[in-house]
Image (spheres, grey):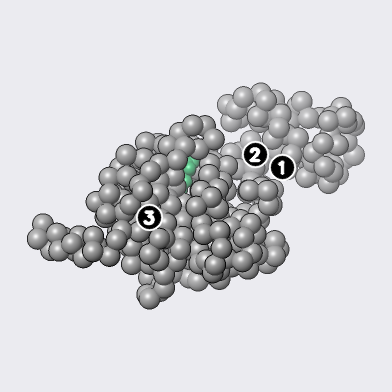
Amino acid sequence: MLEGAARRIEAALQLERREARLEARVLAARALEVAPAWLLGHDRDELRPAQAAALETLVARREAGEPVAYILEEREFHGHLFRVTRDVLIPRPDTERLVEAALERGPTQGPTRALDLGTGSGCIAISLALARPDWDVWAVERSPAALVVARDNARRLGARVRFQEGDWFAGLEGQAFDLIVSNPPYVAAADSHLLQGDLRHEPRSALASGPEGLDDLSRLIEGAADHLTEEGWLMLEHGCHQGDACRVLLNQQNFRKVSTLADLAGLPRVSLGCRPFKGCRESLQHTRIHT
Ligand code: GLN
């Protein structure tokens, strides 16, 4: 039964055989209500009609292109199982690099305030809150439907996160954080990837950001200094070709210790910088007025 399902998925989505097999196994596990590992020894078992029908429904949805995470309504991220719906971006392993960077550089003691902008499923904020229960973690999201999912994830996983509806920094006047992290939309609006694979099914507002994909990254870099504490860090996920552009933007805003970190595949994925010195910011505002 698994081999047939894997072949159909492989043919419909042009996946590699290994990946199609893996997908067939997790879909079958859901249909049969067993653990995927159980299927390793039972992949040739005869199915009861109800089981066969349940598997058929899931395989047909996948054949039609629906992402596995939306079919199962869950995805693992940073060791936790998150509920995902079509209202949120599917958590990616690449984004774990951002969580790690925040945990590595965040203050090791004292009261720490962390902010996740555009939290989506809540996977970044919740992973931080679970790893550092002593941190005061805030999460902002513009989409009310996504916020429902994020709040639900925090409740299920027992994470203490302050969620707030809002558009990036709007609504955060007067608030300063030791860490600001974000996985904003960063795909170029005309990028053909938006029309392929899982991306076709994900919220466009969580993916696309202007002609070069840099609109929201620029807004975040321009707005962050006003919301960072003295030694506060801004850390942003971006596309693998956007590292140079992000460092230029961070340097233009006088961020210090600017650098880019690679993801699991060795590609530039997270750029970061420390809050500009106060004097620098004043001179920057001065320059802005005259240019
Ligand atoms: N990394 C995602 C992709 O290209 C994009 C996520 C995002 O725009 N934040 O599949």
Residue at point 76%, 35% (across, down):
25
Q: Nearer the viewer, residue 82 or 173?
A: 173
Q: Is 85 rendered above or below residue 197?
A: below
In this rendering, does residue 204 appear at all? no
Place of residue 100 in the rendered image (x, y in percent of width and height, measured from the top left): 55, 48
Residue at point 37%, 75% (across, down):
173
Label 1 belongs to which residue?
58
- Camera-near label (3 vs 2) is 3
Residue at point 74%, 40% (across, down):
27
Place of residue 257 in the rendered image (x, y in percent of width and height, measured from the top left): 36, 48
Q: Which amino acid does label 3 sit on?
A: Cys
Asked whether the beta carbons under mark 3 and mark 2 sit within 8 Å of each other, the answer is: no
**Quarter of the image containing the C terminus?**
bottom left
Q: Is 207 rendered above or below residue 279?
A: above
Task: Determine the secondary structure under disc 2.
Answer: helix
Label 2 belongs to which residue?
62
Task: Determine the secondary structure under disc 3.
Answer: strand
145 left or right, relative to 173: right
Asked whether the beta carbons under mark 1 and mark 2 sit within 8 Å of each other, the answer is: yes
Residue at point 33%, 52% (across, down):
256
Q: Is 60 rendered above or below residue 85?
A: above
